[in-house]
Structure formats: structure tokens, C-alpha cells
Amino acid sequence: MSDTPVASREAALRIALAARALNGLDLRALVGALIEKLDAPLTETKLGTLTVEDLRVILAGDFAEQGCHVGVDNEQLKEAIRLLWGQGLEHGDFPAVDAYAEGEMPGSIRVAVAANRGENLDGHFGSCDRFLVYQVGRQEIRLIDVRSTVEADAAEDRNAARSALIGDCQIVYVQSIGGPAAAKVVRAGVHPVKKPGGGAIREVLVELQQRLASPPPWLAQIMGVPAASLARFEDELAAGEAA
């Protein structure tokens, strides 16, 4: 069996949306059940071969003991199959990634955002379908990656795997995050920022962008530069020594 359970981010998105359509089915159990049926890695082509009856058998079969058996009706099964086939996925659900090469935006920071639909901050750290990853500089904001959480949720320690998934970021925006999960995020070198009300990601990032010129202490530490107040103190000290 392949070490990669899901072959592409689109396949991962299909599975995550299908799990949601099935009364919030446990994602790890669904991935395991699909691999048992289709073999790894799970591809869009393989998902497109599934039928409503296949899914009914999967949910009622051996994987019931893994939390994969749920009370769903026929319409829910049909909707889940349509999603697994890739039908009904709105364009906005899968935002386009901007071209980016390392070092192109000097002085920028990398920010992950817990998301479910479109470019919205609408996810909880431990249950969002994906993380959208942005490079944020004083002059521009680029969406550089979309990272599905399907494979992370197949790991034994889901929170640690999710933290590793965004380990190259300096900040992660979430609607909520539990204490143990936050500790693992911090241990991965990422600063969690809670915004319970969520909102359009670009608006949230513009607020962050406006603070890059004169960052508060917590942001200055993340950026590796002196905070504005500390910088002024150092300038005054240097002037005094020169006098």
C-alpha cells in the first residue's frame, strides 16, 4: 500500500466534503474505508467509480466499529457520491493558488488560515477541511498553497500532524483552538491567533498587513525584528551614546 493515502488536494477535498454530507462522518474512518475498497492512493479517478450502493455497503460493513456507521438517508448518500465524483463543487470552494518562489517577497511572513469553504476564515483548528497558506508582505498578499487535512487526520496524533502540516508558517488564524492543540502548534513554531467571528480571509490579512510597518511586540518577535517601541528606545540610546 502507498505511503500517501490521498493522491491530490482535490481528491482530499472531495472526501472531506463527502464526510461532512454524511452527518459529519469521522474523516479518518472514511479514508480507511475507502482505501480498503479502492486501495491507496485515493485518486479522483478511483473516487469517480464509487456508487451509492458501494457507499451504503462501506457504511454498514466492517468499518462500523471504527465510527463509520452513521444513520444517513438515501439522499445524503447520493449527495456524498456526487461530491466524491467532484460534482457540485463551486469554483469558490477551491481558490486558485498564486505563483510564488522562495525569497520573492523579502520581509514577508507566512500565514495559515483554518478554512472550509472558499477564501473564508471559517474553521476550527482541529476540524477544518484545509489550511490556506498565504505569503503576506507590506505590498502584497499571495495565496501560495492549499493544504488538505485529510492525511493529517489519518495520523494517530491528529493535532500534532495538523501542526506539522503548517510548520513552515509563522502564524495560524483559527476560529477556535483547544489548549492542548494550541500547545502543539506553538511547539511547532507557529503562533495561533483566534478570531471567533471569522470572516473573509483577505480582509483579515489586510489588517495584519497594515501592522507590518510598525509591528506590536508579539508580531515583531514573529518577524524577528525589534518592536516599534523598542526600536525607538534603541535609537534614543544610540543618540545618547553618540553625544
Image (cartoon, helix red, strand yellow):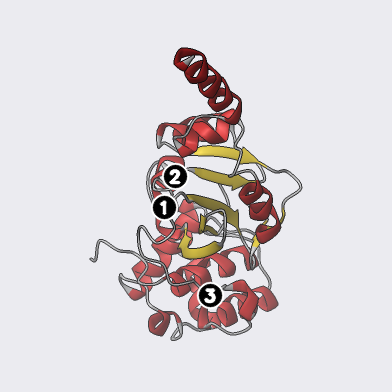
Q: How far apart are marks 2 and 3 (CA)?
A: 27 Å
Residue sitting nearer the eye, 28 or 157:
157
* Image quadrant where residue 184 sits: top left
The amino acid type found where label 1 is placed reads Ala
Which badge, 1 or 2, comes first in the chain's sequence? 1
* Horizontal and vertical percent position of residue 145: 46, 64
Marks 1 and 3, how far apart at CA: 22 Å
In the picture, the disc for residue 71 is: none
Residue wearing tag 2: 158
| Disc 1 target residue | 152
Dots 1, 2 in contact, CB < 8 A: yes
* The disc label shown at residue 96, or none: 3
Q: What amino acid is at disc 3?
A: Ala
The residue type indicated by label 2 comes to Arg
- Out of 181 and 144, give the one closest to the viewer: 144
Label 2: element kind: helix
